[in-house]
Image: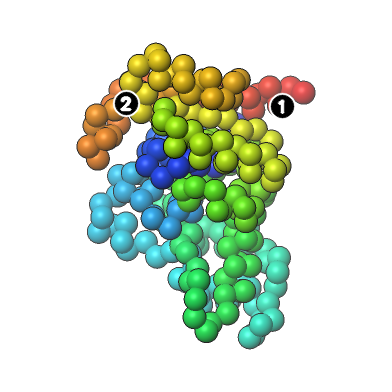
Amino acid sequence: MRGIKIAVSGKGGAGKTTLAAALIRAYAATHRRVYAVDADPDASLALALGLSPEEAAEIRPVIALKDRIREVMGGEGEFFRLNPELGKVLDDFCYRLDNILFIRMGELKKAGTSCYCRENAFLNALVSALLLERDEVVVMDMPAGIEHLSRGTARGVDVMVIVTEPNERSIHTARLVEKLAAEIGVPWIIVVGNKVRSPDEAAKVAAAFPGKVKGVLPFDEMTYQGGEPGGEFLTAVAKLKDVLEGERKDDDQH
């Protein structure tokens, strides 16, 4: 099966991490290997995938592995390779959950005396290796909001899945994400309504994004309480996966 690179974005609290985890599990049932990338500094994707808080806490973010980064990037001081070959070492940075390879990206410090040029270059190279070199499934749980898109973090993905609740604030953020994703050249942008309780709420999301809404996820009490998603939610996610795979097949035929 042909791989696909998916970025999941949206306003904080809209349910993007829950959807990302559900998509990862759905693809893991049909594909040999799935990369699950937690690019959100809140780092909750591991918990959504079923790891305990203790297990999740043991996963070091890639950015913290400074010795390995120095080995890969080479050079001393300010001199390093801008385009390292990561294909052979990529899996060293993964935490394995059966056929799911989990990567926690981590967050760079925003202040201090140390230079983070090497770490920035490494993260860019790592994301590029995942998004451009691997013919496998990659699902990236992006940071909430729009700042990451202003930095072009999602360049190279096949599809941006924007999650929105049926309220004005969430829809507003989703529109900003849609605009910026188009500006950085994401080829396919879709919207998924989440926590939808009624046909009227589904219609509100559809009216806000004409032709872009490819999935509607029902409000799920178990997920809201921090538990595992229920059957109706997972059925809706399976339908969304069918839409994504159908689009890839159409691309292959043209």
Q: Amino acid at mark 1?
A: Asp
Q: Quadrant of residue 56?
A: bottom left
Task: From the top left corner, tell me how far across and down residue 174 is, in percent.
Answer: 52, 37
Task: From the top left corner, tell me how far across and down residue 161 is, in percent.
Answer: 54, 35
Q: CA distance from mark 2 to mark 1?
A: 35 Å
Q: How many marks?
A: 2
Whether residue 242 is visible to the viewer of this picture, yes or no, is: no
Colouring rule applied to residues: rainbow
Q: Are marks 2 and 1 in contact (CB under 8 Å)?
A: no
Q: Nearer the viewer, mark 2 or mark 1?
A: 2
Find disc 2 in the rendering and name its residue: 219
Outermost residue on the top side: it is 199
Task: From the top left corner, tell me how far across and down residue 119 is, in percent.
Answer: 57, 71
Q: Quadrant of residue 125?
A: bottom right
Residue at left offset 54%, top offset 25%: 208
162 shown above or below 61: above
Q: Amino acid at mark 2?
A: Phe
The quarter in which the N terminus is drawn is top right
Whether residue 152 is visible to the viewer of this picture, yes or no, is: yes
Relative side of 79 to 245, left or right: right
Find disc 1 in the rendering and name its residue: 252
Check disc 1: other Cα within 10 Å, few if <14, some if 14-19, many if 20+.
few
Q: Nearer the viewer, residue 10 or 117?
A: 10
Q: Nearer the viewer, residue 188 or 248?
A: 188
Task: From the top left corner, tell me how far across and down residue 31 is, in percent.
Answer: 51, 35
Residue at left offset 50%, top offset 68%: 108
Q: Nearer the viewer, residue 237 or 149?
A: 149
Outermost residue on the right side: it is 254
The quarter in which the C terminus is drawn is top right
Which element type, helix, strand or loop, lies under badge 2? loop
Which element type, helix, strand or loop, lies under badge 1? helix
Residue at left offset 35%, top offset 16%: 198
